Image: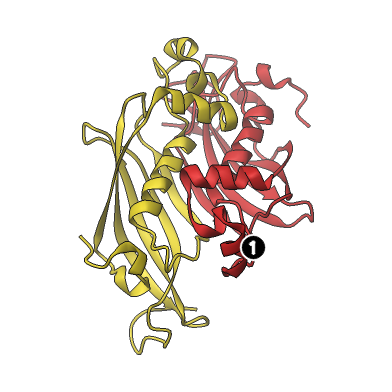
Chain colours: A red, B yellow
Amino acid sequence: VNPVPLDQRYFEDYASGSIFECGSICVEESAIIAFARLYDPQDFHTDPAAAARSVYGGLIASGWHTVALTMRLLVANYLSSAASLGSPGIDELRWIRPVRPADTLRVRVTILETKRSRSKPDRGMVRGLIEVSNQNGELVMSLKAINLLRCRDPAPASTGAELA
Amino acid sequence: VNPVPLDQRYFEDYASGSIFECGSICVEESAIIAFARLYDPQDFHTDPAAAARSVYGGLIASGWHTVALTMRLLVANYLSSAASLGSPGIDELRWIRPVRPADTLRVRVTILETKRSRSKPDRGMVRGLIEVSNQNGELVMSLKAINLLRCRDPAPASTGAELA
């Protein structure tokens, strides 16, 4: 557990190897259908009867809905409002098991790597492995996210890995 | 332009090297804010005044909103309803330029690779490079997506690359 309150956390508080537990969220059937109608209107996301006849044997959440719910937990419990400068990208996003109505998703981040910027020494890059599990402890999704974060101390770090 | 209507397209109709133009969509400020309030409530996505003071100099869409709007165009113009079996994952998602209110996004897919499954010969894997550009022709986002698609001909292909 990180001792610094989220809204006072800066780049320096995201240490490589540390783990952030980001809470959990229940996935409601109505939310699965509402999201999918807007953004991913495939039968197995929008129509319980058609989904039952599909390879999934029942309604499943759009993978992008699972990502969006995960993001909500990351904003609430991982990304500092004082420091977050957005993200340049994501790698190795994997949908491992279907997410179904009434599943409860739990999100955990493990910091893989941090690098202070050399060209913009007021910020740094944090790369995290984000793992999403269901109520049975099964991994349903994982991804590696890069986030840019403002530093508490605007002077450049004297040692350690640096970002161009 | 693919000559086969989308709802009659199968794995065999997604040839390596071919390009699918998937149409365009306008990004409204109200939609940027509504999406971000639900899924990515950071100031630069939800609050125009705070966003103006941020590093982005104004409101920008959540990267996940850009993905969701892209997915809507992919379902409408790329993923066959007869053949789509979902996706195991995404690689190299990159947010290259900010997406701002009133931007119009255009989506194009270039097929990078296709592989029929050996273990389940009624389906195959299609890997596509998805590129999203704005009204000035600037690339704003790219990603590589893997999609599983049902084959028209359920008998295994006699030659060519195969998926385990």
Classify the position of the N terminus of chain B by image quarter: bottom left
Q: Is residue B147 left or right of residue A142?
A: left
Q: Residue at x 52, y 14 (%)?
A: A155
Using a 10 Å C-alpha cutoff, classify the residue at mark 1 as few (fewer than 14 neighbours), some (14 to 19) or many (20 or more): some
Mark 1: which amino acid? Gly
Q: Residue at x 21, y 31 (%)?
A: B136
The answer to whether residue B98 is above or below residue B1 is above
* Residue A148, visible in the rendered structure: no
**Residue where numbered disc 1 is placed:** A58
Q: Nearer the viewer, residue B157 or B150?
A: B150
Disc 1 chain ID: A
* Residue A35, visible in the rendered structure: yes
Image quadrant in which you'd find residue A88: top left
Q: Position of residue A19 (x, y in %)?
A: 72, 39
Q: Residue at x 25, y 64 (%)?
A: B17
Q: Is residue B33 left or right of residue B76?
A: right
Q: Residue at x 47, y 53 (%)?
A: B90
Q: Is residue A49 left or right of residue B16?
A: right
Q: Position of residue A141 (x, y in %)?
A: 62, 52
Q: Position of residue B85 (x, y in %)?
A: 49, 66
Image quadrant in which you'd find residue A26: top right
Q: Is residue A49 left or right of residue B10?
A: right
Q: Secondary structure at mark 1?
A: loop
Q: Count the labels in the image.
A: 1
The answer to whether residue A9 is above or below residue A111 is above
Q: Position of residue B67 (x, y in %)?
A: 44, 42
Q: Nearer the viewer, residue B115 or B135?
A: B135
The answer to whether residue A163 is above or below residue A9 is below
